[in-house]
Image (cartoon, coloured by chain):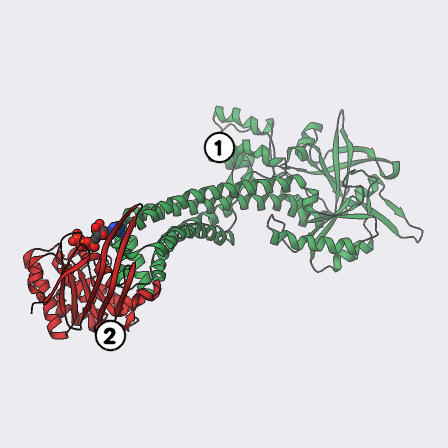
Chain colours: A green, B red
Amino acid sequence: MKELIKIAWRNLWRNKRRTIITASSVFFATLIALIMRSFQLGFYNYTINSVIEHFVGHIQIQQTDYHNNPSIDNVLEFSPHIQQTLSNDPEIKFFIPRLESGALASHAVHSKVCIIVGIDPIKENEFSGVSRHLAHYRIDPQAIEKMSFLPPDLRVLIKKAQGYYAHKQKLQDILTSMDKDFGKYIDQIAWISRFRGQYLRPGDNQVLVAGGLADFLNVSVGDSIVLLGQGYHGSTAIGKYRIAGILALPSPMMNRTFIYMPLRLAEDLFSTYEIKPDGDTARYVSYIAVNTRYQASIRPRDYVPIEHVKQRLEKKLDGDQLKVLGWKQINKTLYQQIQSDNISGQIILMVIYIIIAFGVFGTVLMMMAERRKEFGIMLAIGMSRRRLKQVVTLEILILTLMGIIAAIIVAYPIATYFHYHPIYLGNEAAKAYEQFNFEAYMPTQLPDIYFIIQPFIILVMMMLTSIYPILYLSKLKVSRALRA
Amino acid sequence: MAVIEVKKLHKIYKTGEVEVHAVRGIDLQIEQGEFTAIVGPSGSGKTTLLNLIGGLDEPTEGRVIIDGTDITQLKDNQLIDFRLWNIGFVFQAYNLIPVLTAKENIEFIMHLQGKNKEERERRALELLQEVGLADRANSRPSQLSGGQQQRIAVARALASKPKFVLADEPTANLDSVATTNLLELMEQLNREENMTFVFATHDSRVIEKAHRIIRIEDGQVVNDEKVK
Ligand SMILES: Nc1ncnc2c1ncn2[C@@H]1O[C@H](COP(=O)(O)OP(=O)(O)OP(=O)(O)O)[C@@H](O)[C@H]1O
Ligand SMILES: [Mg+2]
């Protein structure tokens, strides 16, 4: 074999230029494939991570009708049985109850429809990281007034960026995406626009209001708002609450409507509890979000175990008038969008692979044609057809591997870098992302199994081109080849 | 027993409608140690005959028996293996594997035979000495003259210790000095090692050196005489 590899290797370098060009085409195809895949998978995972892992949950337990009619009457008892079942399941990592309902929020002469989310402040924060969104910066006319250090054009421009910001990085990304020059003033801008607010504490009588809603109602931290709505079983829900903090939520829809309050406070507001005949209190929630110890992703090896947990819960909680839903059911659109994007991405890659395979095939054709006489001599002196085929197959293999390995070496650091330093997509793309309530960053997927799968597919496709030389060498007649 | 025995050999090429009867019933015996030239005008069937003897082509009719084995009965891969162990080939040109050095070319055939490295090296160096090219051991074919390439081809043909060597117009591309050198080499190998050579040629310098001359015309033997 060593001898055959030596011959194959040297044969490749008989036509240096052609070999380099062909290997380069394999290199670029693999590089494009890996980088593209890295961004695609990274994006899917980031999306799913933001939406599912940190908000919706892998699985939700709801009252039977809630999914179709999410009203305050279709609530579910957060019963000890459910809590125990969930706590005792070794594959469940985390679960939180939420109580959600619409209401009217008012302050002075302003009022607006809002969505109230009752949460367990501590557990919810561990789960969805609400406190990450707590506004620490606010760009408003008063703040802009004080930014006399800004050149006039930037001072005009910054008006477009009015609003709340949770992090300095986000503030910087937004501003510099409008004009790079903001980068020079970012520390001063941040200092002037700093803003105070507090996250909820469990026993709190306070609420968190989303930035857009707060602006509309013209309220800020320390002000009170009145919430009015319909409670459980036709009761009236009304209450007045102090604002502890403002949330800068990425989703414009959520940012215009959301109010978070501690679960107990929401229960009081909506009267979603009952004293049972035995004296215990039944507490009702809209749903329970559950995370398993697996990862939500579009890869079957990730979502299949989640499905298993879901099925098990269905069996165990059978008869409790409830429904167990997987994240793919809850966020059908998101899943389908990702799925179809994933498929079209793979089709594009396939097309690239096929084009490159034809390029390699062209090289193989030339290699065979110009060496006809040589093959004849080799067969004549006693080299078996099998070995001859091995040499040619090795040539294609080495050629392809050179391109593939080089591409992996180059793609690896790129995919790693952009995972830790994701690209900010700028304001335009941000709008599309924010409807799903996450920031418009585009992290890559860290190199893992896809760094093997894609090159492997390429390798297989390129090796298909060796079918031709194998057939050719099977049929080649020695006397004819010698006459050539 | 003859090393090469050819019985009622026919070869008909069919190209579409046209049939070319390139070999028409040749009977022939060549003994161990002969130094034989097959001569004849262009198109008379020399190459065809040599290819049939060497198992490079199948006869339409007749038998080719090499050292007792009827090679017309062998399957393709058996035939390749048979050639490897029994027959040495020297062609008109481009004999050598271009990516291997002179020494590697000689070793290659022994490699195919599965000989170990030590034996390969020893025999390759020995043969390089014999053909007078020990100093060019590491040259690629493209760095050698036509005459040098043919001498390496002879060395390679001998490396496998064949029963005989077939050479189809080995001197066709050589000048007179190189031709003389190559012939002297083959003659010497014939004399000293009793190696059997059969060559097809219409080069008068080659014919002069032959010990037996088989003249064919139109696919048939018209004259067969021992001259030395
Ligand atoms: N593959 C083939 N198909 C058809 N006809 C062929 C084929 N090979 C040889 N011939 C014909 O067979 C005849 C003998 O050819 P061959 O090559 O054996 O002659 P030759 O004596 O070697 O000639 P030269 O001295 O020119 O090499 C010629 O008429 C040739 O055209
Ligand atoms: Mg000829």
Residue in view at x 85 percent, y 41 percent: A271
Q: Do labels 2 and 1 share a chain?
A: no
Q: How crowded is mark 1: few (under 14 residues within 10 Å), some or many (20 or more)?
A: many
Check disc 1 and report the residue beneath it.
A182
The chain ID associated with circle 1 is: A
Q: Which percent across, then down, holds residue A450? A: 51, 51
Neighbourhood count class around disc 2 (C-alpha, 10 Å): few under 14, some 14–19, many 20 upward:
few
Q: Name the kind of residue labelled 1 in the image.
A: Phe
Q: In what element is the residue under mark 2?
A: helix
Q: Is residue A14 visible?
A: no
Q: Label 1's element?
A: helix
- Mark 2 highlights which residue? B119
The answer to whether residue A74 is visible is: yes
- Quadrant occupied by the N terminus of chain A: bottom left
Q: In this view, does A342 lie to the left or right of A17?
A: right
Is the residue B138 above or below the residue A95 in the image? below
